[in-house]
Amino acid sequence: MNAAAFFEIIGGLPFIDDGSRALPLLTAVACSRRNAAPEAHEALTDYLDPENARVLFKRLARSQVDEFDSSPCSKREQREIAAAIARIVQVNQAWGIFFAIPIRYRKLPQPMSSSTSALIPQTIYLGQQAFDSHIPLEETLVHEHAHIWLNFVMEAYDLQTEGAPRDYVLPSGTSGKTLRGVMAAAHFAAAALKFYGANHNTLPSTERQAYLRRYLAGCLDAAEQRPCFTPMGCLVFCALKASCQDLTVCPEGIQL
């Protein structure tokens, strides 16, 4: 199946396209993991268990990363996470399934906000800043779940071509990023803006929303300067471009 057909089956980009369908994407991810290790588990759903997936990636992934030092979230933190997710889903009920999948939440000893890794599947690391900074916990959870769902897409189809540069720079100034990383950054910003656009009760400062808009546009500009996209990468880019500027066509020079 080519990328365009797959993208149509899953209804577009999770969190961004209103027709996005989570179940076909989850099925594709589970099947991909089972194909990689058919002997690992009997039930297909077991491949979507985060601990099972973590073990599988540690055994089979071509690249490896060191896991953060972390501990289980406290009961209080678990309650705060659950309450924030409930508020997110109340704002956008269609997002409920994006937050219903099994996730390993881990608490970082560092004061940083949050982190995920494509090589540590379905795991969200939260620092103390996730719970007490000026950025709402809801945005942090949308941010990290957006990464997880884009990682699911990338398990099926990569976004960048072989040999793509690894020296992209994010609008924040973070350097040494891959094109995948730039797209992940753009995706979280677009998802956060979509959440805030539907949430008329609790909005962040206008400065925060303006920052997210600049960040999204800056990521897309960095990618467009050197568009080393696979067909799936181009589809993701175009979905994000449409989200940013209400465009429905790819930029000149990028072909599906």
Image (cartoon, helix red, strand yellow):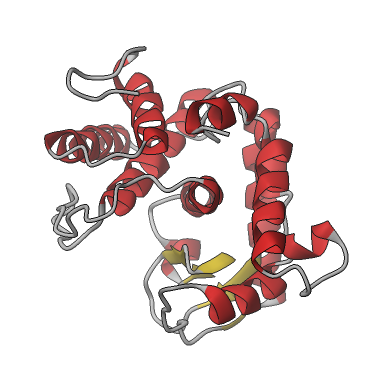
Quadrant where the C terminus sits is: top left
Which quadrant of the structure image shows residue 77? bottom right
Of residues 82 and 33, which is closer to you in this image?
33
> Is 135 above or below relative to 199?
below
In the rendered structure, the answer to whether residue 225 lies left or right of residue 189 reads left
Residue displayed at 46% across by 64% down: 116
Across and down, in percent, residue 9 comes to 64, 27
Across and down, in percent, residue 95 comes to 65, 35
> Is 172 above or below relative to 218?
below
Quadrant where the N terminus sits is: top right
Of residues 42 and 151, which is closer to you in this image?
42
Of residues 27 and 256, which is closer to you in this image?
256
Which quadrant of the structure image shows residue 73? bottom right
Residue displayed at 30% across by 32% down: 206
Residue 96 seen: no
Residue displayed at 57% across by 81% down: 59
Q: Which residue occupies the extreme right position in the image?
A: 42
Residue 94 seen: yes
Residue displayed at 17% across by 34% down: 221
In the rendered structure, the answer to whether residue 201 lies left or right of residue 244 reads right
In the rendered structure, the answer to whether residue 121 lies left or right of residue 238 reads right
Q: How many dots with numbers?
A: 0
Across and down, in percent, residue 236 comes to 40, 33
Across and down, in percent, residue 43 comes to 87, 62
Q: Which residue occupies the extreme front position in the image?
A: 1
